[in-house]
Image (cartoon, rainbow, N blue to C red):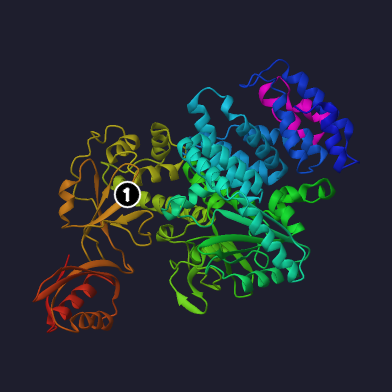
Amino acid sequence: MLRQYELVDRVLSYDPQADEALLNRAYVFSVNAHGSQKRASGDPYFSHPIEVAGILTDLHLDAETIATAILHDTIEDTVATPEEIRRLFGPNVARMVDGVTKLSKIEAQTESERAAENLRKFLLAMSDDIRVLLVKLADRLHNMRTLHFIKKEEKRRRIARETMDIYAPLAERIGMYEFMKEMQTLAFRELEPEAFESITRRLESFRVEGVDRIESISGGLRQLLARGGIEAEVSGREKHPFSIWKKMSERHVSLEQLSDIMAFRAIVDTEEECYRALGVIHRRWPMVPGRFKDYISTPKRNGYRSLHTTIIHAADTRVEIQIRTRDMHAQAEFGLAAHWAYKQSSVRPDTQVSWIRDLIEILEHAESPEELLEHTRMAMYQDRIFAFTPKGELIQLPKGATPVDFAYAVHTDLGDQSVGAKINGRVVPLRTEIEQGDQVQILRSKAQEPQPNWLNFAITGKARAAIRRHLRIKERDETIRLGRKLYEDIIARLPVAPGDSALGDALKRLKLPDEAALMEAIARRNFTDGQVMEALMPGSSSGDDQELPPQHHAIDIKGLTPGVAFTFAEDCRPVPGDRIVGVRQPDQPIVVHRIDCPSLADVEEADWVDLTWGDKADGGVAEIAVTLKNEPGALGTVATLIGQHKANILGLRLDNRDTTFHTNTIDLEVRNAAHLMKLLAALRAADAVSGAERV
């Protein structure tokens, strides 16, 4: 453990103007506050915050951050109070200590509401001052270094899983790769001990066999660059065990089959020399296609800048080489912490971490704990690609992102109004996957709004949170509107018209806050019709919801959105013009069936609602089965007829084929039932078609 004067001397060595008195007060306060508390290792508890502070001095962080590290467990584990910390150490330190305290109980279990609430606090604290995260990462790193002292295996594994799932990716996201690698190695040793031991043993045997291999390649690189007029510091290393295990898992190969377990780094003076060095290396050895990355011209979102290439050095040996300047190297080693070195401590670090702003926006949109955890982890952990706006602005997205994700990354309003996209000048559907380096132009319309099916292909947390937020608002509005129509039907079935006070009395009896809540509850069948009738007019219903009297009338679903207030049954796929009925079950949207749907016979414990399409129903999707003669051009004839009748093919599959006929099932977008019937009649009249029926 660092002694008081040793810790202070460390800070003064890189910041002679540091507040020495602040550091001394914090040290003494922490030692006294923790008193005789012990850690699992048997060491005095105060040794832990002191060691955490020591880790942060290696990053040359300012005195306030070091004091926060010394004090970070005092509020949670001692009788010290936030007011006391504020009075003795000032508002900045007090705020950061409070922030770290809120981060200290994050759990990895996604089903836990407490996990989501702690994650919420975690993100808010980060957004307020990123130094809170730096302290927390150092705290977790030291805890991982002493993990083996914890006797309970279950607790060790939980901490290791938290580290692998939350803290190591966070360290990576802010560019602190050394922290990330050590956390991953220590967590991997606990979570996969057999794999860790196996890889470590085999690496050791490789090391013994080729003891001079890394130095030999490093020396060759150094000489090659020198002959090209470039002075470079060249070093090499083996990749760490977790990185190797991950590559083995992804590629399904053994360690012996991995050819790129060594990585080399060339550090030069200028950005120009980075590119010159790359040219010298590529002239000497062939590059592995697809393995070159230019993070200088397009930095990673965490600010990381470097050139990466993989060459075939000798025989089939692949060697990864990173080329960067000294400043880039400092950024790569310490990431965002490099911006909080004492000389730049006046800089607001959150201005350089745009992804944190995205996470804060997700906080505002997420409704459930599971949703919050899902979106934040998406935002933090996915690999990134680069795409460009038409004006050349760089947008970073996770792999697999679509134009919807791109639009929301630019601006929420643009995402809400997306109707299509052009990728590299070609019009594409919104579900198209964006590739590395694509130029994306979003086509928009003020009449557009987020659609439920966007959730099937939007993958970023920001996009999914915004879509869900819009749909939640729209769903409640439409559910209330639908509930009001059902309420009017209930009123019509009462023996006499209710008085002016009936609604207020009903709300009290049903323990609901307002009229809107009642309408929503009726639509979601949180109450049966009989219960609502009884609440409005006691004695008017037996409560068993017997068959409806003749005055029951159909509910108009005009203006409601499929997938929001109601959904169409997949097994019968009604379209406008079909006679329809709604199935209303507790806490579910109404499911709309055709009146002759066979599956209605299996529905239990539900209310039935007569429905009508309204005057301006605007189409639907029907499924038809078309039996064709097995002859050239038959399918083309069908497609031509469908196009001539202004219908749209959404899906096609071959169900059955023999030497004479083959049957295809086609999903068609049609205006209404009459439109569908005309199309079927036209298909049946075609010589190539043996039969055409609605499924």
Q: Is residue 145 visible?
A: yes
Report the front residue among 102 and 246.
246
Q: Position of residue 477 (x, y in %)?
A: 44, 53
The residue at the point 62 percent across, 40 percent down is: 122
Residue lying furthest right: 17
Vertical comparison of 478 with 650: above or below:
above
Q: Position of residue 70 (x, y in %)?
A: 75, 30
Quadrant for residue 536, please give it.
top left
Q: Is residue 411 visible?
A: no
Q: Quadrant of the N terminus?
A: top right
Q: Quadrant of the C terminus?
A: bottom left
Can residue 291 be found in the magenta stretch?
no
Q: Position of residue 51 (x, y in %)?
A: 72, 31
Vertical comparison of 50 with 463: above or below:
above
Looking at the rendering, the stretch of residues picked out in magenta corresponds to: 68-92
Can residue 83 be found in the magenta stretch?
yes
| Relative to 613, 595 lies left or right | left
Q: Which residue is mark 1?
A: 486
Quadrant for residue 26, please give it.
top right
Report the front residue among 143 and 411.
143
Q: Position of residue 613 (x, y in %)?
A: 29, 63
What element does badge 1 sit on? Answer: helix
Specify the amino acid type for callout 1. Leu
Vertical comparison of 426 with 70: above or below:
below
| Relative to 664, 154 lies left or right | right
The residue at the point 76 percent across, 67 percent down is: 230
Report the front residue among 149 and 264.
264
